[in-house]
Structure formats: structure tokens, C-alpha cells
Amino acid sequence: QVQLVESGGGLVQPGGSLRLSCAVSGPTLDYYAIAWFRQAPGKEREGVSCISSRDGSTDYSDSVKGRFAISRDNAKNTVYLQMNSLKPEDTAVYYCAAQLGGTATILEGWYFYWGQGTQVTVSS
């Protein structure tokens, strides 16, 4: 059974940075594609970033490209989302998701395993 636990959320001022972590327990992380999603109040959940297991290739939504960076440390079974130049519109609950296989995508339906989420609030 794969379990995902997000951490690192909090309150930050506009222009600030946060690093989210997604700790994965169960089978080794090596074979899982991982993605980050977010859901703001009153809005649908949207894909933010993903990283493949096969070659570590990454993808980002247009809204975060150039500001966010996803990375993985398979030895620690952890995936990170470094978020820089944060804006109030980045405020949301952030979720990580995992799927067995090499290919990664920021399409929600691809992923079977989900964490409980961590709140990120960007406000002055």
C-alpha cells in the first residue's frame, strides 16, 4: 500500500518561498511517477507539476512555470516542490499524487494514490 504525506505548507508573504515535501511510504519510490496538484477555494483541482520515474523529466503548468521546481530524492522516498516568487493566487491546498509507471502527467485522472494535502497561504 502506498501512502503519501505532504508537509511544508504555511503562511508566506507575496514574493516569498516555500518548499513542500511529499514523503512516500510503501514500495520504493523509484518506479512511481509523482505529481503535485492544488485546489483553491471554490475552484477545481489543477495540476501544478510532475516528475517521471523513468528519466526524471518534468512538466509544469503555465501558471507556475519559471517559479516552481519539482525534484525527487529516491533514496529518501521524498519528492519536493520548491515554490519561489509566490503570489496570492498560489493560495490553495497542495496535494501530491503517485502512480506506478514511468510516465508523468499533470492530468488528475492518471493518479491512483493521493495525499491529504497541505495548506499554502500567500498573503501580506
Image (tube, rainbow, N blue to C red):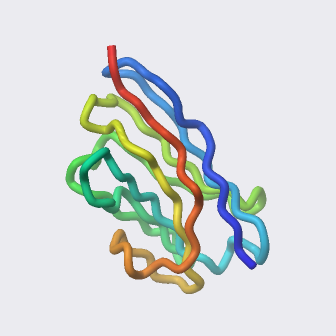
Above/below status of 55 relative to 93: below
Residue in the image at 58% along x and 74% along y: 113
In percent of width and height, residue 25 lies at: 76, 66
Q: Residue at x 77, y 61 (%)?
A: 75
Q: Residue furthest left?
A: 62
Residue 89 drawn at (x, y percent): 25, 36
Left or right: 93, with 88 as reference point: right
Which residue is most to the front?
42
Name the one closer to the observer, 61 or 113. 113
User: Residue at the location (38% across, 18% down)?
Assistant: 13
Residue 118: image quadrant is: top right
Q: Residue furthest bottom?
A: 101
Q: Position of residue 49 (x, y in %)?
A: 39, 59
In this rendering, would 2 be left or right of 40? right
* Quarter-of-image position of residue 20: top right
Is residue 71 left or right of 50 when viewed as pictured?
right
